[in-house]
Amino acid sequence: MTQVIIGNVIALVASIIMVYTGYIKIKEKIILWQTVQIGLSVVSNIVLGGITGAIINALSCVRNILCYKDKLGKKEKAVLIALSIGLSIAFNNIGWIGILPVVSTVLYILFMDIKNVRLFKYLTITTMILWMSYDFYIKCYVAGTFDCLCLIANVIALIQLRMKGVKKNENIPEG
């Protein structure tokens, strides 16, 4: 029980930092705080026994840094996908549920360059459903709740886009 509490406290700090990064306007600071947030998520996953989540979060940190440095090309994406799949299969300790973070990250890496706002929202919703299921399974209730809130926010955004008449093929606005 102490392990669950510690893991969730760490996840709470990580989740607060995740929300905080939404308010930051300077890209360098966003990357710095996202790196801290992902690092805390790695620790939380390890404490709660979610090894595949820890692996995927660590690789997501690498992905973010490569993306920030504008060095995330097809080759780098392929390497990250291969590492995600290979390491997760090798270290998965919780059966099929341990594969959910892998599926989430592979989908995200493959489609993260989508410019279509609606499709990007669907991508985010899909990845949040996978992470939410995983987080609740490993008893990371805080992260699962934040995943759920993110999912709800994206569904609301989709509804608002439809109400504003944004076309299905419109791109994400710059800035």
Image (cartoon, rainbow, N blue to C red):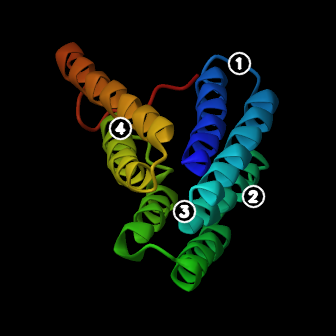
Marked residue nearer the N-terminal end (2 or 4): 2
Q: Which residue is mark 3?
A: 50
Q: Residue at x 49, y 35 (%)?
A: 142
State which mark lies toward you, 2 or 4: 4
| Amino acid marked by disc 1 | Lys
Q: CA distance from mark 3 to mark 2?
A: 29 Å
- Estimate the x, y position of residue 35 in percent, counting from the top left: 75, 43
- Estimate the x, y position of residue 160 in percent, counting from the top left: 25, 17
Q: Residue at x 31, y 23 (%)?
A: 157
Marked residue nearer the N-terminal end (3 or 1): 1
Q: Which is nearer the eye, 82 or 76? A: 82
Marked residue nearer the N-terminal end (1 or 2): 1
Q: Which residue is mark 2?
A: 71
Vertical arrangement, residue 72 with respect to residue 123, above or below: below
| Amino acid marked by disc 2 | Lys
- Estimate the x, y position of residue 175 in percent, counting from the top left: 58, 22
Q: CA distance from mark 3 to mark 4?
A: 26 Å
Q: CA distance from mark 1 to mark 2?
A: 22 Å
Marked residue nearer the N-terminal end (4 or 1): 1
Q: Which is nearer the eye, 150 or 173? A: 150
Marked residue nearer the N-terminal end (3 or 4): 3
- Estimate the x, y position of residue 57 in percent, counting from the top left: 62, 56
Asked whether, in this view, residue 129 is left or right of residue 1, the answer is left
Q: Which residue is mark 1?
A: 25
Vertical arrangement, residue 35 with respect to residue 63, above or below: above
| Amino acid marked by disc 3 | Gly
Q: Residue at x 44, y 47 (%)?
A: 114
Asked if residue 72 shows in the view, the reply is no
Vertical arrangement, residue 30 with respect to residue 39, above or below: above
Q: Which residue is mark 4?
A: 121
